[in-house]
Structure formats: C-alpha cells, structure tokens
Image: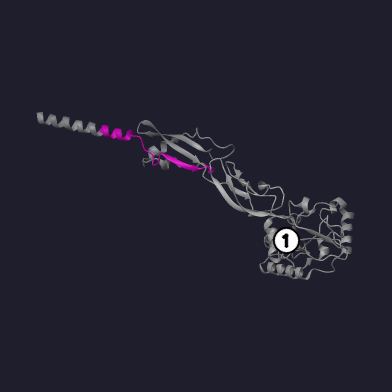
Amino acid sequence: MKKKLVLIIVLCLMLVIALSTMVLMLLKAVSLKADEIVYEYGQPLHIEYTSLLDTEDQQILDSLSVDESQIEYEENQTYPKVGEYSIPLHYQSFFKKMTTSLKLIVKDTTSPQFDKSTNEINLFVNDQLDIEASFSCSDLSGCKLLYDTSQVKLNQEGSYPMQIKAVDPYENENIMDFMIHVKSRPVASVGNQVTIVNGLLIVNKKHGIPSDYATTEDPVAKVQIQKLISDMQALGYDISSDYNGYRSYSIQRDLYNSYVSKYGQAKADTFSARPGYSEHQSGLAFDLHHQNRKLVKNENEVQWIAQNAYKYGFIVRYQKGWEAITGYQAEPWHLRYIGSKAEDIYRSGLTLEEYLGVEGGNYR
C-alpha cells in the first residue's frame, strides 16, 4: 500500500512538472528571425511582419498586431524619412499577451544623378565661366555640386581637366570628369558684304549676304543632305526625298512679305528671314520633310536628326532655348551645312553664334 502511494505521488509530480513545462513553453516569447530590417530611402514601406516571427503557430500569427505609429513619412509620400524606428509587435501566446519589437532602419545609399552634363566646356579668352549652366543634379534627399575652378586660367588659352561631384546630405556622390577649353576669340573677316569666321560663313539677323551671293545649292552640301535622307529612309524613318534647299533673294523676299501680310512683321521675324538674311540664300541650308511634305516634327525623326546630322557635316541650326541667340524659334527640320567642324559644334552644345564668337539676336 505504501509503495502504491509513493508511486501515485511520483506520477503526480511528473504530471505537474510536464504541465508546468508546457505552460512555460506556451508563454515563452516568440523570437524574431531578424531583429532589424533595412529599407532604402524612397522605397514604399511594405513589410510582411508575420514572416518575421520565428513560429508556425497559426494562432499566434493570426493574433499579431503591429504599431507603426512612430514611423515618420515624407510629406505626401508612401516612404519613411531616413532614420531608425522601433516597431512594437503584439501577439497572444496561450492566454498571455506578448510584445516584441523590430528595428526599422531607413538609409539613403543612392547616389545623386546628373540631369544635365557635358564632356567639354568651350570658352573664349576672358569669357565668364559658369559651371552650373552646364551641370545640374537631382536626388530625393537633395544635392549640391562641388567643383574647383581655381586652376582654370581664363585670361589665356589652355585646356584643363576637371572633376565635378554631385553630393547629397548622406555623403553619397556621383563624379564626372570633363574638360574646360579656353580658346582665343576667332578673327572675323568681313568683305564683299559677308562675314566669315574661321572659314565658316555666318548668316543671321546681324550678318547678311548680298542678293547675288549664290545661285544654287552648294554641291558638297547637296550630296551630303541626299546621303542623310537616303540613310534615314533605309532605316525606316518617315522622311521625303524632297526638301527645301536654295532659295533666291527674290523668292525669300516674296515669301517673307507674304508672312508679314498674314501675321505682321514682329511675328514673321520669329520664323522667317528677311531677304538678304536667310541661310537658304547661301545654298548651305536645307529644310527636311516627311513623306506627306510637311516639315519634320515627329519625335522619332527629330531625335535621329539631332543625334546624327553632324556625321554628314550638318548642325540643327535653330533649337529650343536658343531663340534669343539665333533670333528664330526652334526648327528641328532646318539643317545648316558646316563640314568637318560640325561634330565639334555638336559636341560643344553651343549655337553657331556662340561657337564662332559672333553677335546674334534680332536685327540691328
């Protein structure tokens, strides 16, 4: 009897211990698979919190609630500000409410981007240097440009290797190398009522040509424009073999006068040259058309011409943003033959007036 009683007591103790162990296990806090999670700044916040709990107990997972109230978001955005945040996670374990916390770290590790940049800046001696006219940057956190021009001698000819940094507040940076070329201002020769600078004829509202300057298209320019058109057609672009090239003084006069009658002189002067001031009269200018004979304006053709015309010796003479210098509104269809210097002008990002160092703008 005594042995039986002892056995019962031992079994009861074992049962108590087993039940106690089970309860303790049920009440034990569930650990996280990772104590912290890192997000890139600008990334919308979307965390699957249940996947972070180191448990497969569906009751615990179903009971999970998260407190994101301490997270600070950028205004009107779905992503948090840079910083560290503690996120409480609440869940039910057996009959007891439990809490753990997750550290959210939001970092900005993305370098700023250059929105505007160039490989070269070309200046004439004693010109003013404005780096930020050629470069700009952007970044979610904001950015600034850092550069040192102390070694650039603007009062004499020379070429200077330069470096510019786009830097954000978190020390992310983007670096570009470029060159500054300082050249002597070209000498212009004015004779027989024409202006030629470094071997290039300049025709604009300040520099005209005689009424009998040319009688037809420049033969080299004609071959090159036909080759450009042929190559575009072979690539499938909507471009016509017909174009507007040479235009005599008298035809230009009649055309200009018709525009003045229709729109008034002030408006006509923004898109049509007065007789004696038209590049078409030089035999070096060409207006390109689509197959329907309308001037080229479609984006595909405009972009190809802008990026490839120099390969044939041409520049797009009148571009958006250049109106105050060239004197005319943008004409992506109007090409001027330059020859071997076309690529240099294209790479410079300058108007023909700026490149040659001559006066542009409106009529005197």
Whole-percent x and y of residue 339? 73, 65
Q: Describe the colour scheme in one phrase.
A: one colour
Q: Which residue is mark 1?
A: 315
**Residue 280: % across, % down:** 81, 63
Residue 331 horizontal/vertical position (percent) = 76, 57
Residue 48 located left or right of residue 12 = right
Q: Position of residue 79 (x, y in %)?
A: 54, 40
For this orientation, the residue located farthest to the front is 156
Q: Which residues are magenta?
A: 19-44
- For this view, does 276 lie left or right of residue 134? right
Secondary structure found at label 1? strand
Q: Quadrant of the N terminus?
A: top left
Residue at image position (82%, 64%) is 282
Q: Is residue 3 placed above or below 252 in the rendered structure?
A: above
40 in magenta: yes
Q: Nearer the viewer, residue 200 or 150?
A: 150
Residue at the (18%, 33%) spot, across then down = 11
Check disc 1 and give the amino acid type: Ile
- Please tell me which residue is depicted at 24% across the width and 34% down the height of the picture: 18
State yes or no: residue 207 in magenta. Answer: no
Comparing 343 with 79, the one in front is 343
Whether residue 269 is visible here, answered yes or no, is: yes
Location of residue 295 by image quarter: bottom right
* Residue 1 seen: no
Residue 272 picture quarter: bottom right
